[in-house]
Amino acid sequence: MARVVLITGCSSGIGMETALAFSRAGDIVYASMRDTSKAAGLNAIATKEKLPLTAVTLDVTQPESFAGLVSDIVEKDGRLDVLVNNAGVLPIGAFEDTSEAQIRQTMEVNFIGPALLSQAVLPVMRAQKSGYVIMISSLSGMASKSGDAVYAASKFALEGLTEGFRNEVAHWNIKTALVEPGQYATSIFQGVKQAEETPDSAYGSLNKFLRDEVSSDTPQGLPPERLARLLVEISHSDGSRLRWAADETAERVMSAVFAQSDDERGAFLRDVGGIDWWIEGKDAPEAGDGQGKEG
C-alpha cells in the first residue's frame, strides 16, 4: 500500500529532491512550500514522470493553517504516514549583531513550526497506530560554533524536543528520527550571502570571514539527492535509531561529540525516565517502586 507523505520546504534543494525521491518510490507525496508559484520545476518533473505528487501551500510560521492541511490530506487519502520537517533558515554572524526579529524568525521556522506541525499530525498517527516523524536537524544541533549561535539554538531545541517525545509516541508505534547532515549544496545558504552588513559592528571582520567561508564551501557541498535517498531509507527503518548521520563528515562529528552510542544514550534516557511500561503498553507501576529515577 502506498504511504502518504507530507514534506515541508519543497520549493528547492533538499525538500524538492526529497519529494521526488518519495514519490519515485511509489509514495503519495504532498510537497509543501510557502509560495507554490515556486513549484514549477517540481511540477514539471512530476508531470513528466507521472509521479503521485501534489504541491501544496504551507507556511511553517502560520500554525493556524496546519490542522486544515492535515485534515484535507486525511480526507483525501485516509491517512498520513510520514512527516518530514525540512524547512529551515540559516542566519550566520555574531550573536550580538543578530536582531531580535532574526532570532524570533529562526526559532519560528526551525523549531516552533516543526514542533506544532508534528503536534498536528500525531492524532492521525495515533488513530492509525503507526507513523514516522523525521526532523532535519544539523551538526549545529549537537555542537555550536562561532557564527552559528542562533541557528544552533534552534536546532538544539529541535533535538531536545524529538528526543523527549520519542518515547511518548512509541506507545502507538509512531517512530521518530533526527537527521544530521553535513554541508549540502542547497539554497538555505543564499540567505548568508544576502545578510546585511552592520557598518559599525565590533565583529565586522569575523562576520565577513564566516560568510565567506560558508559561501566558498557551498558549491562543493554534497548533492541534495543523496540526502533525499537516505530519508526514504529512514522512513522504512524500524525506528530503533534516533540520530542518523547523513554523510562522512556527520559521522566524524557525531562520534566526537557523543561518548555514548545512540543505543546507550537511548537506554540511559529510558532508564532515567522510568517509562518502559508506557512504551510496552503495560499498566503504570506503583509510585515509589524505583522505576522512575532522578537524573
Image (cartoon, helix red, strand yellow):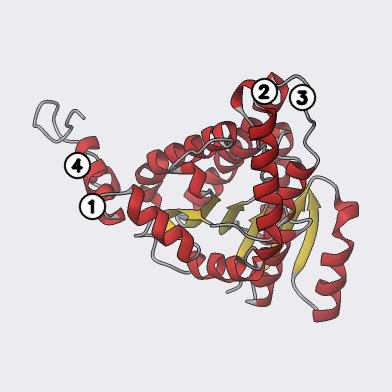
> Mark 2 and mark 4 in contact (Cβ < 8 Å)?
no
x, y percent for residue 80: 60, 56
For mark 1, does the 10 Å Cα neighbourhood hold few (<14), some (14 to 19), or many (20 or more) residues? few
- The image shows residue 22, relative to residue 62, as above or below, that is below
| Amino acid at dot 4 | Asp
How far apart marks 3 and 1 lie (CA) works out to 45 Å
The image's mark for residue 223 is none
**Residue of label 1:** 264
Amino acid type, residue under disc 3 in the picture:
Thr
For marks 2 and 1 on the same chain, the one whose residue lies earlier in the sequence: 2
Q: Residue at x 79, y 56 (%)?
A: 11
Mark 4 lies on residue = 271
Residue 36 falls left or right of residue 140: right
Which quadrant of the view contains residue 98? Answer: top right
Gap between marks 4 and 2 measured at Cα: 42 Å
Which residue is disc 2 drawn over? 97
Can residue 90 be spotted in the picture? no
Are discs 3 and 4 less than 8 Å apart at CB?
no
Q: Nearer the viewer, residue 217 or 149?
A: 217
Spot occupied by residue 81 in the image (x, y as percentages of width and height): 56, 59
Q: Are marks 2 and 3 in contact (CB under 8 Å)?
A: yes
What type is the residue that disc 1 sits on?
Glu
Task: Looking at the picture, tell me which residue is in the foreground, 267 or 138.
Answer: 138
Give x and y (percent) for residue 129: 45, 55
